[in-house]
Image (spheres, rainbow, N blue to C red):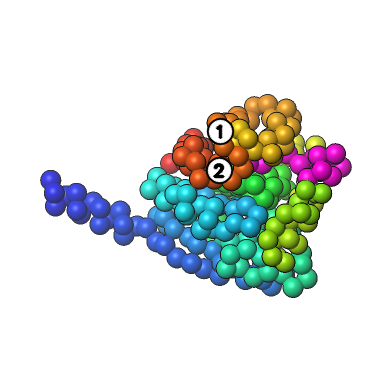
């Protein structure tokens, strides 16, 4: 049996293609994108949080590896102003980051992807699912919920984010995150199945509760004893991501 096992392992490795590609946004920025897993696997787009990167949010916690091991093609950009990607000279963040996500999918010729967004990435992912519903197969939001346009929550969130971030790029990005808010009508346009994961001690949990109240069919998993950052490194988040993508996969 040993030669058969070795041959099978070699065959599986041969189908996996790890690469780093550069994608140009509509406004001319270079986004650095890691692509891993079987080329024929269903694509999963991972969108990291503020002041994080593809490596810190997804690779180090083992989420990228868990998804590729499960047979998925994982697409992991460093978002504008983060990691290895360019920062905009005009300081534009907010809604344009949805265009960035679409640019990544277009460049890789991906018509429809599972989307997983944590924190800031969740805001981008939810807006993507609302405004481009045909591009999103499923959506998992980690540490993020519904930021409602014109609400007190949006104002409070905006004020809090003006004090967040490290360095000019992430400070500018944080100050514009509240512009990713959605109206009730826009939220209603989300067609993809959605799951939510949040740490028990996460300050953003009120936004998750707000979203669950609006879309009660979307399940929420609360990870005990962890906050916003602790959830990223938890086994529970990694397991929830893989379980969610598998649940809504056609494989």
**Is residue 147 rendered magenta in the image?**
yes
**What label does residue 42 carry, if any?**
none
Query: Which quadrant, please, contains the C terminus?
Result: top left
Query: For this view, does 71 lie left or right of residue 136?
Result: left
Q: Circles 2 and 1: CB distance less than 8 Å?
A: yes
Please report the residue visible at 57 percent of the width from the left and 59 percent of the height from the top.
53
The reply to whether residue 163 is in sight is yes
Please report the residue visible at 72 percent of the width from the left and 69 percent of the height from the top.
88
User: Chief secondary structure of the magenta span?
Assistant: loop
Query: Is 220 rendered above or below residue 79?
Result: above
- Tag 1 or tag 2, which sits nearer the N-term? 1
Residue 102 is drawn in which quadrant? bottom right
Tell me which segment is drawn in magenta.
143-157
The reply to whether residue 40 is in sight is no
x then y, percent, for residue 194: 61, 36
Residue 217 is drawn in which quadrant? top right
Kindly identify which residue carries mark 1.
225
């Amino acid at each position: 049996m040993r030669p058969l096992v070795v041959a099978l392992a070699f065959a599986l490795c041969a189908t996996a293609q790890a690469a780093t590609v550069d994608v140009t946004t509509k406004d001319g920025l270079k986004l650095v994108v890691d692509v891993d897993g079987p080329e024929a696997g269903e694509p999963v787009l991972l969108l990291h949080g503020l002041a994080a990167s593809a490596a810190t949010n997804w690779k180090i916690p083992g989420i990228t590896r868990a998804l590729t091991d499960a047979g998925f093609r994982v697409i992991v950009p460093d978002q504008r102003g983060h990691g290895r990607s360019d920062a905009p000279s005009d300081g534009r963040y907010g809604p344009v980051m949805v265009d960035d996500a679409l640019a990544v999918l277009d460049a890789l010729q991906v018509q429809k992807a599972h989307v997983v967004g944590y924190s800031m990435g969740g805001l981008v992912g939810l807006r993507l699912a609302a405004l481009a519903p045909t591009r999103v197969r499923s959506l998992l939001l980690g540490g993020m919920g519904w930021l409602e346009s014109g609400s007190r929550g949006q104002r409070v969130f905006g004020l809090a984010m003006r004090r967040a971030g490290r360095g000019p790029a992430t400070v500018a990005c944080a100050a514009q995150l509240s512009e990713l808010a959605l109206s009730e009508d826009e939220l209603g346009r989300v067609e993809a199945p959605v799951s939510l994961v949040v740490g028990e001690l996460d300050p953003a949990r009120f936004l998750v509760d707000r979203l669950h109240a609006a879309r009660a069919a979307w399940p929420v998993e609360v990870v005990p004893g962890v906050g916003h950052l602790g959830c990223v490194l938890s086994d529970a988040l990694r397991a929830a991501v893989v379980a969610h993508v598998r649940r809504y996969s056609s494989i």
